[in-house]
Image (spheres, helix red, strand yellow):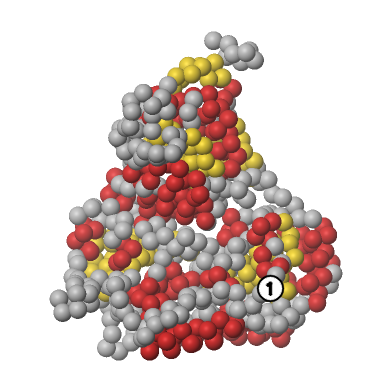
Amino acid sequence: MTNESGGGTVRLTVAQAIVKFLQVQYSERDGNRRRFIPAMFGIFGHGNVHSMGQALYEYGDDLPFHRPTNEQSMVHTASAFARTNLRLATLACTSSIGPGATNMVTGAAQATVNRLPVLLLPSDYYASRRQGPVLQQIEHPLSGDISANDAFRPVSRYFDRISRPEQILTALPQAMRVLTDPVDTGAVTIALPQDVQAEAFEFPLAFFEERTWRNERKSPDAEAIEDLVGLMREAKRPVVVAGGGVIYSDASEELEEFSASFGVPVGETFAGHGAMRNGSEIALGGLGTSGSRAATEIVSKADLVIAVGTRLTDVVTGSRSMFQNPDVRFAGINLSGFDATKLGARPVIADVQSALRALTIAAKEAGIRPDDGYVGEASAARVSWKRYLNDEVHQPTPGEAMSQAETIGILNVESQAGDTVINDAGTLTGDLHAQWDVSSGTFCHLEFGYSTMGYALPAGLGVRMARPDGEIYVFIGDHTYLMAPSELVTALQEDWKVTVVLSENHGAQSIRALQMGSAGRSFGNELRHRDPASNRLEGDYVKLDLAKNAESMGARAWNVATPDELRTALQEARKERRSCVIVVETEKHNYGPDSGVWWDISPAEVTSDPVTQDLRRQYEKNRESQRFHG
């Protein structure tokens, strides 16, 4: 059949058309072209098995289907896959109506906060309404076109609901535009009513032709670079805050050259951890509330802060208490003008790699040179921090179980080039941020934009899909593990090996530490039995056999309690083909080193508890350190 433009059509259902369309979408950057959506994850129910399942079976030979055990988890897998592919590829996720759809909302928020592309295809109510209220449909008394899927709107960068088949002709290209735009990207949600998925339409054949979405590198404005060179010329203590944008732009070499050429120390955000890869003497490591003391010491005195590819969240800026030099000025290098101007920064709105290259050339031409004294100060701070970690933090504490920090030190030594360590929330995120060293060629994947407990294990599957070689270490606590252990079944089903290093510290010890610092009383954060006398969860610790739990889902497991046992287990796990879980008995309240950076967590303003009263007074004193920078 020929359409009005003379190009011909093909009769397909909406679901079939979506499957065919996704298989011909490509991304390209720097001449490298790849499939943008090479696979689909999904869990079928009555809302999508009849149509999307059928379409994948008939037309999805080049769109492999993977079935996880939880809808939230599959979105996390897609996010991690996208992150590992520098946002140049992602996965699609299909779900049924109702709980299957809304299970994906948390994953959507995590992706959008971290600006990671994921395509969500939740099923929806019947558009025809002939059936009356259908199973799993929410009825709104004042609006007939609202469903549970409207919950995706605030956590999606683009949302559409398809009520007629021909609407996908515009909706899907718009979805691809957002997904492939590094400024606008995040979760994209296309809600698919059950009946519309199965409806047929004469789609133009041109709709299914290959299309390449180019990720163009935006060049910086020459005047903006000149302004930043002027700031560098006047600065005595410049620093760089390196965010995830450095990694996504593949700009680590450019950052290292810039840092070395002008003696500018670099601190890294959580998303930017590992941006400095070659062990520079002025790479300060993690920065902020859970960063290194070296970064705190140098950055707090900076008179010029160049924020590169970062959103400057409160955990990075110490709730805007970090930058204490009264003469500090800011510059922002970012593709997003919204982020580039934060803290009153002088903006350079451009691709990070392109901007750093231009800035390095211009600063060299301006005759800017390193200050040997300042470089020496930053280098000494870094050396002192490394020595402190090796000589104290990573050493055993007599009479105690292994500390979490000690476990990190052992894993860092045992890891090899190409290995990846992943964490999502809790004390481990901060400990890894402060202590993990990537100079041996490892990667550190920290999710702290949304701090999503339950992200790390499914994320390990996404990283494994994108990075077939090297060990994938999912380093998590017991509280996080209990949120998504079933993805070990997906790992078994797909033969995707991950190694879970499980710090068993018997609860959400990160939040307990915050609670002790802001309320002064431990309440409700540990894995304890209920005490009959107090009727509170403060009895004996719950005894769990997490190793047996992991074995029941196909993993090889160890229980370890000493450094030698941990080393042996890690070495044996590296030789295994199946997934592994190493349960490490960890001291409950032995926390990692303090960064010295304040975080605004406010105690109760009114209380009769004298402990909390004292903490409130200290809080109000600390709050005086907050600064308004513009």
Q: Residue at x 27, y 78 (%)?
A: 562
Label 1 residue SS = loop
**Image quarter of the N terminus:** top right
- Which residue of the protein is positioned furthest toward the top in this rendering? 1
Residue 281 in view, yes or no:
no
Q: Residue at x 71, y 86 (%)?
A: 373
Residue occupied by mark 1: 629
Residue in the foreground of this view, choosing between 189 and 229: 189
Mark 1 residue type: His
Q: Is residue 119 above or below residue 609?
A: above
Q: Quadrant of residue 250?
A: bottom right
Q: Residue at x 42, y 28 (%)?
A: 127
Residue 153: image location, x then y, percent: 50, 45
Q: Is residue 550 left or right of residue 362?
A: left
Q: Residues within 10 Å of mark 1 (few under 14, many from 20)?
A: some
Residue 243: image location, x then y, percent: 59, 64
Q: Quadrant of residue 175?
A: top right
Q: Residue at x 66, y 57 (%)?
A: 338
- Which residue of the protein is positioned furthest toward the left in this rendering? 532
Residue 336: image location, x then y, percent: 66, 55
Q: Is residue 108 left or right of residue 316?
A: left
Q: Is residue 340 left or right of residue 421?
A: right
